[in-house]
Amino acid sequence: MADVGKAIQGYINEILRLSRDDISTAVKSREWILDRIQTAISNQVEDIKLYRPSPRVHFGSYFKGTKVSTVDEFDVLFVLDSKGITHSTTKFSGSGLGSTTPNPLSSYIIRGSSAISSIQVLNWLQRIAQDVVSSFSGQAPQRNGQAIEVIIQSRDLKIDLVPALIFERTPWGQTFYAIPKGDPQGNWISTSPRVDIEQLQTVASGKANFRNVIRLMKRIKDTHNFQVSSFAIETAIVTYGSQNSWSGDLYMEVCGMLLYMQDVFRRGVIYDPFDSGVNLLTGVQNSGRYAERLRRIVDQLMDWQRQSIYTIDQATLNLKLKILFENG
């Protein structure tokens, strides 16, 4: 007797399984290069300094337990001393935290403005990373949107370095960060990785396979070429998990998630959990097509569920499901 839930679990175990050896090796390589970049920043004279109480903050899918397949990429904030810097948007305002006076960040202000240029700060971080990797003939770091991408070829490992200004939000006293928006104007966006991780942990608590459901949706996003950020996918499913009961039946939860994501793409809205004025799907051109693709996937799963008892053996179902998730 074939079982769709068993086929989904098998796909997760086979395709999305993370090798413990790969993880251990990748983490050692990550810390090796990050320590050297941090030391290089600290050794600078009269230039940008790191925020001493917490110079690095880990974020992204690996640290949230939603990494898909091989551990070959890490995201790390390099937190900059932001004393004397202010940050203000329609939603948030804050005062920079730190101790450096005068703050060298002031020399990175956009001409004719009072705002720090995220482009200039990214260029600074790229120069630092370049000096470090050139010492062992590594591949030159490249700008990658909001980050500086460092690649360790011997480990097939990529690390995205993101400069972050740190602020105390007024009047509530919460800590948040501004990271590069990645636009040509050199703007910043507000974020709080720790809050993001805590929200996921809270919603996932007691929900079997919740993180695997996120990982499965991210895999479908990749294999079906959805031009949507992983952060947007994770944000939407955390919202789904917080608003719906969780049966623990993997088939039912995957179908429920796919139907929910279909509606999300049809509406074209995923609100940033830190700033509800930001739509994470802004600029996505094909959300309607993504909704149709997810509908076809869930319809096929439901069809197999109806007929699997009678006409499909487990091995055949496993293969059909893999083709569906990988190729459509």
Image (tube, grey):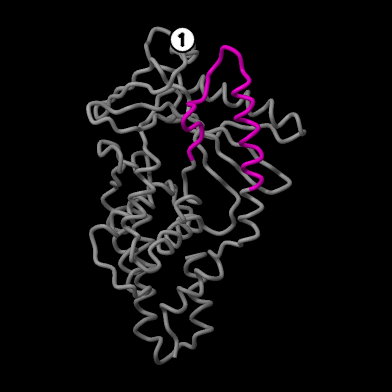
Magenta stretch in the rendered image:
28-57
Query: In the figure, 183 relative to 261: above or below?
Result: above
Residue density around tag 1, few if under 14, some if 14–19, many if 20 or more, within 10 Å: few
Residue 34 included in the magenta stretch of the image: yes
Seen from the viewer's position, the closer of residues 121 and 232 is: 121
Residue 219 at what x, y percent from top left?
48, 59
Say above or below: 106 vs 182: above
Give how far across and how far down residue 8 sits, in percent.
Answer: 45, 73
Give the structural element (helix, strand or loop) at label 1: loop
The residue closer to the viewer here, 235 or 165, is 165
The residue furthest top is 112
- In this figure, which residue is indicated by the disc labeled 1? 102
Question: Is 172 or 249 nearer to us in this picture?
Answer: 172
Q: Is residue 249 left or right of residue 154?
A: left
Which picture quadrant has residue 179? top left
Residue 243 at x, y percent in the picture: 23, 59
Residue at image position (36%, 55%) is 201
How many marks can you see?
Answer: 1
- In the image, 272 versus 296, the foreground residue is 272
The amino acid type found where label 1 is placed reads Pro
Is residue 150 rendered to the left or right of residue 77? right
Rendered image quadrant of residue 83? top left
Q: Quadrant of residue 96?
A: top left
Q: Residue at x 42, y 79 (%)?
A: 4
Image spot of residue 177 (x, y percent): 39, 31
- The question of residue 193 being in magenta is answered with no
Q: Residue at x 34, y 72 (%)?
A: 299
Instruction: Point out the image quarter for the N terminus.
Output: bottom left
